[in-house]
Amino acid sequence: MVKRYLELRSLDEALRLLTASFPTPSRTETVPVTEASGRVVAEPVFAQYSVPEVSVSAMDGIAVRSRETIGASDRTPLSLMHAVRVNTGNVLPPEFDAVIMIEDVWEDGGRYQIRKSAPPRQHVRPAGEDVKQGRLVLPRGHLIRPFDIGALVTYGITEVVVLAVRVGIIPTGSELVPFGVRPKPGQVVESNTIMAQVFLSEMGARCTRYPIVADDPDLIRKALQAAVAENDLVLISAGSSAGTRDFTEGVIRSLGDLVFHGVAVKPGKPVMLGNIQGKPVIGLPGYPLAAQTVLREFAAPLLEHWGFAPVPRFRIAARLAQTLTSDPGFDEFVPLFVCRLGNELIATPHGKGGFVQMATVKANGYVHIPAPVEGYEAGTTLEVLLTTDPGSIGRTLIFTGSIDPALEELGGLARNEGLFIQATNPGNTAGISALAGNNCHAAPLVLPVNAPPTAYLPGSLFPHSGVLAFIHIAKIGLGIASRNELHVTDLLHTRFINTPRGTPSRVVLDSLLAKEGIDPRQIDGYLQEVHSPLAVAAAIRDGFADAGICTSGIASAYGFFFLPVAIEDYELVMRKETLSDPRIRKLVSLIRSPDFRAVLEKVGGYNLTRTGSIRVTDGEKSLIPSSVEDLPEAPDYPSSS
Amino acid sequence: MVKRYLELRSLDEALRLLTASFPTPSRTETVPVTEASGRVVAEPVFAQYSVPEVSVSAMDGIAVRSRETIGASDRTPLSLMHAVRVNTGNVLPPEFDAVIMIEDVWEDGGRYQIRKSAPPRQHVRPAGEDVKQGRLVLPRGHLIRPFDIGALVTYGITEVVVLAVRVGIIPTGSELVPFGVRPKPGQVVESNTIMAQVFLSEMGARCTRYPIVADDPDLIRKALQAAVAENDLVLISAGSSAGTRDFTEGVIRSLGDLVFHGVAVKPGKPVMLGNIQGKPVIGLPGYPLAAQTVLREFAAPLLEHWGFAPVPRFRIAARLAQTLTSDPGFDEFVPLFVCRLGNELIATPHGKGGFVQMATVKANGYVHIPAPVEGYEAGTTLEVLLTTDPGSIGRTLIFTGSIDPALEELGGLARNEGLFIQATNPGNTAGISALAGNNCHAAPLVLPVNAPPTAYLPGSLFPHSGVLAFIHIAKIGLGIASRNELHVTDLLHTRFINTPRGTPSRVVLDSLLAKEGIDPRQIDGYLQEVHSPLAVAAAIRDGFADAGICTSGIASAYGFFFLPVAIEDYELVMRKETLSDPRIRKLVSLIRSPDFRAVLEKVGGYNLTRTGSIRVTDGEKSLIPSSVEDLPEAPDYPSSS
C-alpha cells in the first residue's frame, strides 16, 4: 500500500499546533482614518483635543442666566432682560449658564418670554463632555467600525496604526493556467489563490499572489523561499496530496520543519503545515472546497489568533431535511441550503464533493459535523453557519422532486423578481416524501396524465391538512432519449440506463416492453438505475449509456433524439394552504406569464395548453379546478426571517 | 411658541414613504471578478465552458478498465494488464472508465495489483460535473461572497455586472472645518459626511463628498442641484433643525417637494426627506448619533430596498442591567454595552445623548425601543443588535461602582493584553447594588480603611454565595479638591459641590465639618450633589464649582490642589467564585505588575503598599487574607460566546 500521510491529526490538535507554534507577527501599518474601517487598532488612539473645547449650546434656543429665570411659570411668564439667540453648537457666551429650547420661548415686544425656569447648565454641553484631550478613544485590539470613524475625525485623529500581516500565496501545478486564459482539456484555471486573496483581504491581510509554479521541486523551493522572506504567513496551493508530482511536503522539509501533513477533516484532509524560519507555511489542497475549508478553518483562525477580527458568521438553528452521514473520526463541513418553511428553518445538504464549486455557490450555509458524530438523522435540529445575508432566507422557496428544465427556466425568471427557488432533484418518490414530511414548499412531480392523485399521493401520507394543490406547469412527453436515432427494437443492441422501479418513467417503459414482447433482462443496463430522468440524460451525455428513459423537455435541452412513449403532466404539488403564500402567488403569475411560455417554446418539447391552471383535491382526492384567488389567506406565513 | 416641525411622522410611516416614493435606480457597473466580493449581481452570470470539459480523474491513483477489475479481492488479488498512473485532475484516457485510489494499489513486479474491483465511473469526474457551459452560475440579486469568486474564475468569468448607486453627500454649516483642520472654539470638524461615506461604501454605494457649504440658502441650493444631477440619492448634512440658519427645508421646497420633516425617532428627530426630480434627498441631523441613526435606519434600508445587501447585524438576547426609560411615541435607539456574566449576557445602557460620540465608540450594540414602549425594567431580556464581533463579548469584564483614574489605567494595561474592561461610574452604592444583583463582574469601591465589610456590603444583599473577595488596588486619599489652594475655613467663601448623602466621601466630609464646628448649610452648594468624586472633579474643571470632595488620585489627574482629609481603600469587590475566572486571574497579575505600579506612581496620589493583595470575607464577613491560587476553579465560566 502506498503510504499517503505520516499521521492524520485531529482538527483540534492541528489548530493547537497552528496557533501555538508561531509568534504573533509584530507588523503594523499606519492608515488614514478614512480607510481604517474593518481594521484592528495596534496602538491606542488618544483624543487630540477636548470636544467641545469650550461650553456650547446643546439646543437651538436662547442662552440665559439661570438665576434670572427663577419664578417663570405658565401663570407668571417672565420676559428676560439678558438672553441671546443661540443655535446648537454655538459657543455659550461666558455670562450665560443655561439654554432654553426655542420651542419654550415666546416673543414679547422684542424680548424673549419664558414660562418655565431653567436650572443651571440646562441644555449646555460643558467643555470636554464628549471627550477630553489626551483620553483614550480606541484601545489596542479595537475593531474599527464606520461610526467610530466619525468620532476619530471629530477628535482630530487623522491616521491610525493598525494590525497588518503579509500573506504570500503561491499557486503550484503544471495543469494550471492563469485567470483569464481558457483552459485546454486537463487544464484548470488557477482560482484557489484568488479565492484566498479575496477571503483573507477581507480580514485585513495584505496578500501577494505569486506567479504559477510548475510541478518542479527546485522551482517550488525557490518560490517558497522568496515568499517566506517577504511575508508573515505563506499559503502554498496544491501539491499536498500523494500524486507523483506532489512536491510540497518535500520542499517544506528541505527548507524547515514539517509540523503536520494530513488532518482528519473533510474536505481538506491533505492540509499541511510547515515551519520555515519561524513562519507558518500552510499547504492548501487543490480541490476548491478543500481549499475553502482550509482557508476558513485554518488560515482565518490563525489570523484571529493574531488579533484580526473574524469574518462575521451567523449561526442559526435549522431542521435537517435529509439524513446526513459523516465519517466518524473526521470533522466534516457540509454545504447546506437553509430555507424557511412555515415557521421553521429547514436545511438541505448540498453535496459533499470537494470539487463541485457550484455546491458552495448554491449553498447559503454549512454545518460542522464534529469528529465523533457519525451523522444526523433527518429531522435533527442543527446549528448552521450562514454564508449569506440571513434576510435572503425568507425570499427562498424550496422544491424537492423531479426537476425538469422547465422548472429551471422558471427559477431563472423568479430570481429576476427577487424570489429564489432552491430545487433538488431526488425524483418523484423522494419529492412526495419531502412534501409529506413538510420538508419543502412544493414537490415538482411527473405524473401520468389524468391519474387520480391517490395513485401517487396516498391520503395516508397526508393525514393532516390532506388537501393538495396541483399547479400545472406543462404536459411533457416521456420516452426514450438517445444520442442517435433509435427504435424500440434497437433497445436490444444498446447500453441502456434506467430510473428506479416504481417511478413514472419506469412504469411507462415496463408496459411498453410488455406490449412489444421484449424481455427487459435482454436489454444491457436495464437494471442500471439512476435516480431521475435528468440523471439519465447526464449518463447518456457522459457516454456511460447510449439510451434511457427521460422526458421530452430534457431530451430537447440535451439535443438528444427522442422516441415518445407517453404524455405526462409536470405538476408543482403543494399543500393547499401553501397557495396563499405571497411567494407562491408571485410564482403562479410567473408561470402564467408570456415570458415563461416563450422560454419553454424556445426549449421545445412542451405542451402548454394547461400551463398555470390549478386544481385541488377534494375529500376523495379527486381533482377539481381552483384558482389562487379562491383560496383563503394562509395564517401567519412570514415572508422573511 | 416657535413652530419647529410641520408634523412628526411615525418611523414606520416615514420608512414607507421613503421606500415607496422613489423608483429603484437602474444603475449598474461592470467590475473585475476579483473586485466583486460584497457586490450584488445585476445581470445573471453564466458558465463560459463546462468544468471539467472532459472526464478527469477525481483521485491520485491508477486509471483502469472497470471490466478488467472484476473479481479482485483480498484473497484473489489481481494484477492489471492495462492501467496508467493518474493524478487528481488528469484527463482520463478514453480507454479507461474508472480510477482506483493509490492507497488501494500494490506494486507487483512492474504491474499494479488491486484487491477490490472498481465499478464503472469510480473516482471519475465526468465532463460538466461541476458546471455545464452556458448554465446559470449566479442569478440576479445574488450577493457575491469570497468563495463564489473561486467558482467564477474557474468557470471562465472575468467580470460581473453588479448593482451600483451613486450617493452624493453635502456637508453644510458655517461652523464646520474640514477633516484635518483643528477647530477653533465653536467650530467642529466635519465628520458626519465622512461617517456616511464609510458606512454606505461598505454596502456598495459609490459616495461623493462635496465641499462644505456655508449656511447660505443660495449656496446650499446650488450644491444640492449639482448633487441631485450627479447622484441617485443625496444626503445633506445638518441645517435640518429649527435654528436661525437651518435652510435645508426651504431649499428642498424651492427645488422639489418636501416629503416629510421630523420623525418620531430618537436620536434623529429632525430627519428630512425631499423629492427633487424624482430623486430622494435625505436631510441628516447634525448631531453625530442622530446622523448615525438616520444613516442606519433610513439610508441603509433604502439601499436594501434597492437590492443592496444589508450590513451584517447580529441579534442577541441580553438581560438589561439598569432600567431604561423611553419617550412613548418615539422609536428610540439606545447604545448598549453587552458583556457575559457567568452564563448570562448583560446589557448596560450607554447614554442617550445625541452628541456624545464616545457613547457609540464604547458601546458594542444598541437596542431599538419601539414607539409604544415606555422603557424596560432592569432585568428584562432584550433583543440587542451588536455593532461588533460577537466573540469580543467573552473577552470583556464589566465593573460598576466608583471609577478612580487608577482603574482607568488598569483598563489600558488590560486592553493591551486582549482583555476589555467596561467600567461605569454610578458611584459606590449603585456598584454594590449591581454586585448584589449580579449585574457586573466586580464593583470598584472606595471604602473606609479597615472598615468591616458589613458596613457597606450587608449580608442581606448577598443571601446566596455571600462570600466576597476584595482585591486591593491602592490606598487613596480622600479630601477637598480645588482649583486654587484652599483651607477648611475657606469653605465658607467658596462654591462647593458634593457627593450624595451616605457616600464615603460625604460621610468623611460631614465628620470633618462637625469636628471643625462648621454648619454645612453655611457652605454655598453643599447640597448640590453629583454622583461621584469624578463628577465632582469634572464640575470644578468646568467651572460650575470651586471646590468639592474627591480622591487624591482624581485631584492629581486633574491637576487640582488637594487638602487631604482621610485615607480610604480602593478595592475591587466581587463574589469569591469570580476570582477563578481566567480573566480576573489575568487582571490580578496585571494589578501586581511593575507596569501598573509605574503608571500609578506617575499619576501620583496613591499608596501602593498593599496593591494586589486579596482578602475574602469569612462567615462573619470579617476579612481574611487570600490568594488567587487558593481558590477552587469556578465551574463552567465560558471565556467566549
Image (cartoon, coloured by chain):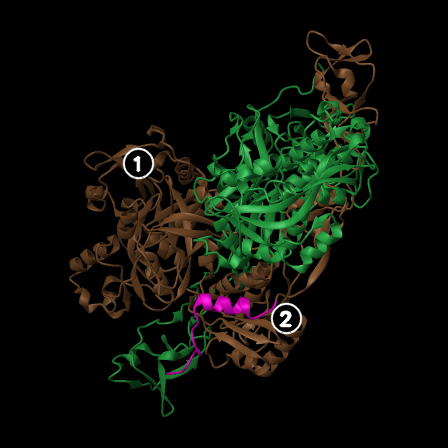
Chain colours: A brown, B green
B62 lies above or below B199 = below
Residue B399 is situated, as x and y percent measured from the top left of the image, at 58, 44
Horizontal side of B434 relative to B593 (left or right) equals left
Q: Amino acid at mark 1?
A: Lys
Chain to which mark 1 belongs: A
* Residue at the farthest top position: A75
Say which element carries label 2.
loop
Q: Quadrant of the C terminus of chain A?
A: top left
Q: Is residue B163 in view from this perspective?
A: no
Q: B501 or A558: which is nearer to us?
A: B501
Residue A21 is one of the magenta-drawn residues: yes
Q: Residue at x 41, y 39 (%)?
A: A587
Q: Residue at x 29, y 78 (%)?
A: B116
Q: Using the rendered view, name the quadrant where residue A182 is placed.
A: bottom right
Residue A229 is one of the magenta-drawn residues: no
Residue occupied by mark 2: A210
Residue occupied by mark 1: A576
Residue A280 is situated, as x and y percent measured from the top left of the image, at 58, 71
Label 2 CA crowd tier, 10 Å (few <14, some 14–19, many 20+): some
B105 lies above or below B211 = below
Residue B556 is situated, as x and y percent measured from the top left of the image, at 76, 45
Q: What distance separates the C-alpha of mark 2 from that of mark 1? A: 58 Å
Q: Which residues are magenta?
A: A1-23
Residue B450 is situated, as x and y percent measured from the top left of the image, at 60, 45
